[in-house]
Image (spheres, rainbow, N blue to C red):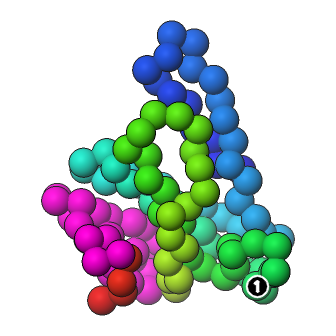
Amino acid sequence: MLFTWDLNQQYPERRGYRIHSIRYLLPDVQVSPDGRWLAVARHGGDAPSPRSPQYFDMVMLFDVSEPGPLGKPVAYLPARFIRESTCLAFSGDSRWLAAGGGASVWDLKAGGHRR
């Protein structure tokens, strides 16, 4: 489960987003410098399911530019993680997202295309 709080509220309410998997770890979570994107690294060993787009290793990308509950990810970016060395990093202009452990880089301005 991924939990979020809206810290603009006087009494922030905890909200959860269910991460689907039989076995999973969330080795890194990062917010882009411009505050638009929340990237969640998901290390999983489960096979694809017709009920969920979440499977194997991926980065789930959420648009958090507007306050409110966390919606569905805007992108599921396939990745390859090594559990002990997984990390995410945004470029200073929030255009690029990189995932260490498998050397994946995505151009978020071009719709999340892998480079």
Image-based side of 90 in relation to 103, left or right: left
At x 76% / y 85%, what residue is drawn?
A: 48
Total marks placed:
1
Inspect the magenta stretch and tell me whether residue 53 lies in it.
Answer: no
Can you name the residue that lies furthest to the top here?
10
User: Against 86, is 67 above or below?
Assistant: above
Q: Is residue 31 visible?
A: yes
Residue sticking out furthest to the bottom: 115
> In the rendered view, does 5 fall on the left or right side of 93?
right
What amino acid is found at the position of numbered circle 1 in the picture? Pro
The image shows residue 61, relative to residue 45, as above or below, that is above
Whether residue 82 can be seen here: no
Report if residue 88 lies within the magenta region. Answer: yes
Which residue position is annotated with label 1? 48
- For the record, the magenta segment spans 82-111
Q: Is residue 85 above or below residue 113?
A: above
Residue 70 lies left or right of residue 61; in this view the side is right
Mark 1 nearby-residue class (10 Å; few <14, some 14–19, many ≥20): few
Nearest to the observer: residue 85 or residue 93: 93
The residue positioned 53% from the left and 34% from the top of the image is 68
Residue 20 quadrant: bottom right
Q: Position of residue 97 (x, y in %)?
A: 32, 70
Where in the figure is residue 67, as x and y percent of width and height?
Answer: 46, 34
The picture quadrant where one finds residue 46 is bottom right
Q: In which quadrant is the C terminus drawn?
A: bottom left
Q: Residue at x 63, y 41 (%)?
A: 3
Quadrant in the picture for residue 54: bottom right
Q: Where is residue 107 in the image (x, y as percent from the top left)?
A: 28, 77
> Residue 37 placed where, x, y %?
38, 54
**Residue 95 vs residue 7: left or right?**
left
Please name the residue shown 69% across and 75% down the image. Answer: 53
Secondary structure category for the residue under label 1: loop
